[in-house]
Image (spheres, rainbow, N blue to C red):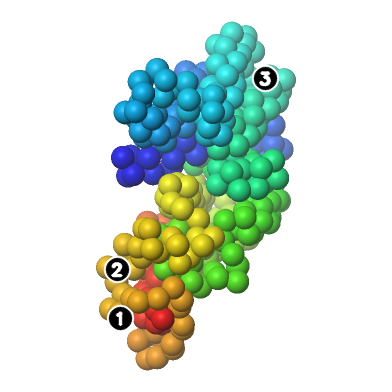
Amino acid sequence: MFYLTILTETFLYLCLAFLAGSFLIRLLPATSSIKIKVPSNLQLAAIWGIALFAFIPLIQLISHIARRTSLGSGFETVLLSFRIGNAWLFLFIICVLFSVYIAFVKDTNSKLTAWTGVIFTALTAIGIGWASHAGSFEGVLGAITHSIHLFAVSAWVGTLIMVSWFAPKSVDWLRFINNYHPFALICFAIVVLSGILLAQFTVDLRQYGDALLVSYGQSLFLKQLFIIPLLLYAVFNGVWMKRRLQADTAFQAQPWIRVEFFIILFILLLTGIMNEQSPPLHIENLIAHTGYAPILNMFYDGSMDGAGINLVLDGSVFFFIGLAAICLAASIYIFKTKRHPALSYLASLLFVIMGYFAFIQSIVVS
């Protein structure tokens, strides 16, 4: 059930991003000239995908309550008495109204339709944010912060999905990148600022290092490692790509935009994992109840008997740091020499792996 929930969380974010992108593609100056027609059937599928994937985490809770009462009572209790149930009920109502609007709207290409779709998408983000860890711990402030974070990610990823997979190859890529780059920077700034605030809600920053002992902290650390190659691809696609297109207007930027999308996909997967894990607000109690992170047990060789981490730098640490730096440099070299983007993507994944091994080699649990 745990792995199923992680996958459904990832698909939930992808459905939300698809919806955001399918409407923003008609509104943004960078993309309004790109002729992309998104079938309303796909939009309806994404809407009901959100309702379905958001419901999956409720099943275990409903089953637990139903064992003591009945299935009907379990549904009623969860939907009406639990915060996560209230949030899903709100989300379900929004999805019903959203799907009715999409099914009966006549002019699907109008700006009014697009703006209405963006508003509905924002409301679904609020429903998801309501059920988040931040919403549970910080109430309205946490829910709003998570919703803003989620919508900014969806707007960024959604437009990448549209341009990466739905746009024709004949797009004027230089014009697109010139206009899209400011929008992407705004989205990234909102994601980073809201992400820092969300981290403060779920992790005591004074114990950030110790939080790496549990699964939530490990997922957060890997997520942050993936942000480094993501920033690199932002430079590729936002700065260096302009120079390349100015020199060669026939160059296809689409494969490199897809690589950026796949890096974000890993970040969304790790976000889904974090949502299914307990935040490390009380490290000692969490370790006592759930134990150390399984991935730490797999790769850490030392003895684990404590709730703190010390860093020790030795030759093996610098070796893996050096390998990680080589992987990043290789990714730049592959772009500069016009090699296949898949090689650059592989180099980025190896950077994350080497960076993680450098961390594992540097820690001592005490």
For the residue pair 179 and 350, the one nearer the viewer reads as: 350
For the residue pair 17 and 122, the one nearer the viewer reads as: 122
Residue at the image position 62 percent from the left and 55 percent from the top: 201
User: Do callouts 3 and 2 mark residues in contact (Cβ within 8 Å)?
Assistant: no
Q: Earlier in the sequence, mark 1 or mark 2?
A: 2
Residue at the image position 55 percent from the left and 38 percent from the top: 131
Gap in Å between the C-alphas at discs 1 and 3? Answer: 59 Å
Q: Which mark is residue 297?
A: 2
Q: Could you tell me if residue 198 is visible in this image?
A: yes
For the residue pair 87 and 37, the one nearer the viewer reads as: 87
Q: Could you tell me if residue 252 is visible in this image?
A: no
Q: Where is residue 52, by image quadrant?
A: top left
User: What is the x, y in percent for residue 178?
Assistant: 68, 50
Given the image, on which type of amino acid does mark 3 rest? Thr
Q: Relative to 220, does residue 187 appear above or below in the rendering?
A: above
Q: Relative to 295, does residue 256 appear above or below in the rendering?
A: above
| Mark 3 or 2, closer to the camera | 2
Q: Which mark is residue 113?
A: 3
Which residue is label 1 attached to?
A: 302
